[in-house]
Image (cartoon, grey):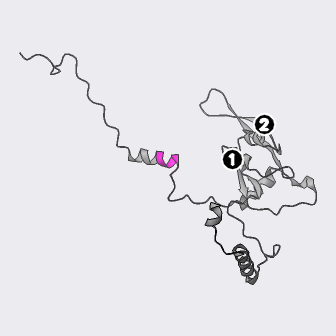
């Protein structure tokens, strides 16, 4: 009964408030975006298509292993690189195939998050529908073409915490010059702790 006394006693107050919102909305002119003719304004972090920066890919296979849909297909070969002054040549992975099947992709973004070398990016482009489902398999060349549409990263929040790299660089710059080590006493020299003569 205590709750009844706290409520306002005007019957139909909620109905009047709801009708006021309806009337306010009815008097406002509706705006419809004419999509094919007018491009929509997308949110800054919208997910469209995944772009590949091929030179950053080291074929670590993390994206393919973490993908819940198994829609990333990677193939590579090893290549020997002669290093001057080294006893033997080194090996490096060369990317042969990097395909993403967008007919299976659920756009979770795990592949982009786990990539340690920033080889995968979100592009806001979403107009890549095809008449044949087989054409939704994008190879590394097609994924590389989407890099031109990737927006630049947002600026850092000036009120946020600086990154670890920034704080480390600032600490190194502010550190005083290395002090010379104190001189070691010579053996046999008076240390000042002996008894007076």
Q: Quadrant of the C terminus?
A: top left
Quarter of image, res 34:
bottom right
In screen coordinates, is 193 left or right of 102? left
**At 94% across and 57% down in the image, what residue appears?**
132
Which residue does the numbered mark 1 point to in the structure image?
A: 113
Relative to 186, does residue 113 appear above or below in the rendering?
below
Q: Quadrant of the N terminus?
A: bottom right
Relative to 73, does residue 147 appear above or below in the rendering?
below
Would residue 94 be counted in the magenta stretch? Answer: no
Which residue does the numbered mark 2 point to in the structure image?
A: 77
The 10 Å Cα crowd at callout 1, few under 14, some 14 to 19, many 20 or more, is: few
Q: What range is drawn magenta here?
A: 162-168
Could you say where residue 18 lies in the image, as x and y percent from the top left?
73, 75
> Residue extending furthest right?
132
Relative to 19, does residue 54 appear above or below in the rendering?
above
> Residue extending furthest left?
197
Circle 1 — which element?
Answer: helix
N-term mark: 2 or 1: 2
Would residue 165 be counted in the magenta stretch? Answer: yes
Could you say where residue 4 lies in the image, as x and y percent from the top left?
65, 65
Q: Main secondary structure of the magenta part?
A: helix
In the depicted view, which residue is nearer to us: 102 or 57? 102
In screen coordinates, is 18 left or right of 84? right
In the depicted view, which residue is nearer to us: 134 or 94? 134
**At 62% across and 66% down in the image, what residue appears?**
5
Could you say where residue 11 lies in the image, as x and y percent from the top left?
70, 75
**At 78% across and 41% down in the image, what residue appears?**
64
In screen coordinates, is 21 left or right of 135? left
In the depicted view, which residue is nearer to us: 106 or 172? 106
Circle 2 — which element?
Answer: strand
């Amino acid at each position: 009964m205590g709750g009844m006394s706290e409520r306002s006693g005007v019957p139909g107050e909620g109905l009047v408030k709801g009708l006021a919102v309806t009337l306010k909305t009815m008097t406002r002119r509706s705006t419809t975006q004419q999509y094919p003719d007018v491009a929509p304004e997308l949110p800054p972090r919208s997910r469209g298509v995944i772009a590949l920066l091929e030179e950053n890919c080291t074929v670590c296979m993390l994206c393919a292993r973490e993908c819940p849909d198994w829609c990333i297909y990677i193939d590579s070969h090893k290549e020997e690189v002669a290093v001057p002054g080294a006893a033997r040549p080194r090996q490096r992975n060369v990317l042969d195939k990097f395909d993403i099947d967008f007919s299976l992709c659920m756009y979770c973004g795990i592949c982009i998050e786990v990539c340690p070398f920033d080889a995968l990016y979100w592009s806001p482009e979403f107009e890549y529908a095809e008449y044949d489902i087989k054409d939704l398999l994008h190879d590394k060349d097609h994924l590389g073409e989407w890099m031109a549409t990737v927006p630049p990263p947002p600026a850092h929040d000036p009120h946020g915490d600086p990154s670890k790299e920034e704080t480390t660089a600032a600490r190194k710059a502010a550190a005083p010059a290395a002090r010379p080590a104190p001189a070691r006493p010579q053996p046999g020299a008076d240390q000042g702790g002996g008894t007076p003569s």
